Image (spheres, coloured by chain):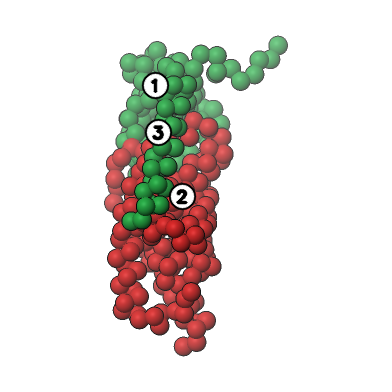
Chain colours: A green, B red
Amino acid sequence: MKKNDIILIAAFVLIAFLCMAGIRLFGMKTGKTADVTIDGKLFKTLKLSEDTRLEIDGADGGKNILVIKDGKAFMEDADCADKICVHQGAISHTNENIVCLPHKVVVLIRGEQESIDALVQ
Amino acid sequence: MGQKTRRIAICGVFTALAMIFSYIESLIPIPVGIPGFKLGVANIAIIAVIYVVGNSEAVIVNFLRILLTGILFGNLYSFIFSLVGGMLSIMLMIMLRRTKKFSMTGVSVAGGVSHNIGQIIAAVIVMETPAIAYYLPVLIVTGVVTGVVIGIVGQAVTKRIVRSAGNSIIENE
């Protein structure tokens, strides 16, 4: 390994650290609701304050099971091949998300006023 | 066999190799819980092409293996993400190698990290979810680690390819 390699690695690690610091300082707000979208279209909005168990019929006939408990949301089960969505664990902060790519399912945590994208009079 | 035919044949072999690596990698589930986490074993083949064959061949092999792997094993979304990541990765690797200031490990690290960054950027745009960028820090760090490993293995592999084929494998710069 040359010296430049070390510099390169250190630079990347620094960038990663700065991103993380920025996110933690400015981005981590406790969320209020979980928006479930299938293939980009909003399917259901759930309140994190209410314990729920939701069966999601994703793309390609896939099935995901979303659970909300103690203010956190997590994917309890899915019949996709890799189950990455299941292994991700629980999310609860604004903008945290769980994605099941094969089923095109996205669970996105939204904060206070952010769930209103437009107001029609 | 003429030089040109030889080049084409070798590209074919490496493309197939990269696809096999990708496939085997997909069979071994590593439950890290980070979407988009990959060891990037196929990069061993790609790096070998860069160092043993040539830059333009590497770009073609990289594109082909992404295209074919996407058709055979993936879906449209994963193909788009891989393509963006892969193209960014190969361009950066070729650039870095040209400067002659980095070892294969450094080139591999740059390739791995840029592949991840490219995938995230593509995912954010396609899925219209800026929140996916939340995973950037983690994937940069894992990109560095896997990049180092792939770089070390790549050096061992490339050394042996050149040694066993002599310098007759291809007339390279």
What residue did someone put label 1 on?
Answer: A92
Q: Is residue A27 left or right of residue B32?
A: right
Q: CA distance from mark 2 to mark 3?
A: 18 Å
Which quarter of the rendered picture does the N terminus of chain A lie within?
A: bottom left
Dot 3: few (<14), some (14–19), or many (≥20) neighbours within 10 Å? some
Q: Position of residue B56 (x, y in %)?
A: 54, 67
- Residue A17 — which label? 3
Q: Are marks 2 and 3 on the same chain?
A: no
What residue did someone put label 2 on?
Answer: B115
Could one spot residue A89 in this view of the protein?
A: yes
Q: Is residue A36 left or right of residue B104?
A: right
Instruction: Specify the subunit that label 2 lies on.
Output: B
Q: Is residue B70 left or right of residue B17?
A: right
Q: Are marks 1 and 3 in contact (CB under 8 Å)?
A: no
Q: Nearer the viewer, mark 2 or mark 1?
A: 2
- At 42% across and 24% down in the image, what residue appears? A24
Could one spot residue A56 in this view of the protein?
A: no
- Judge whether A91 appears above or below B109 on screen: above
Disc 1 secondary structure class = loop
Q: Are marks 2 and 1 in contact (CB under 8 Å)?
A: no
Disc 3 secondary structure class = helix
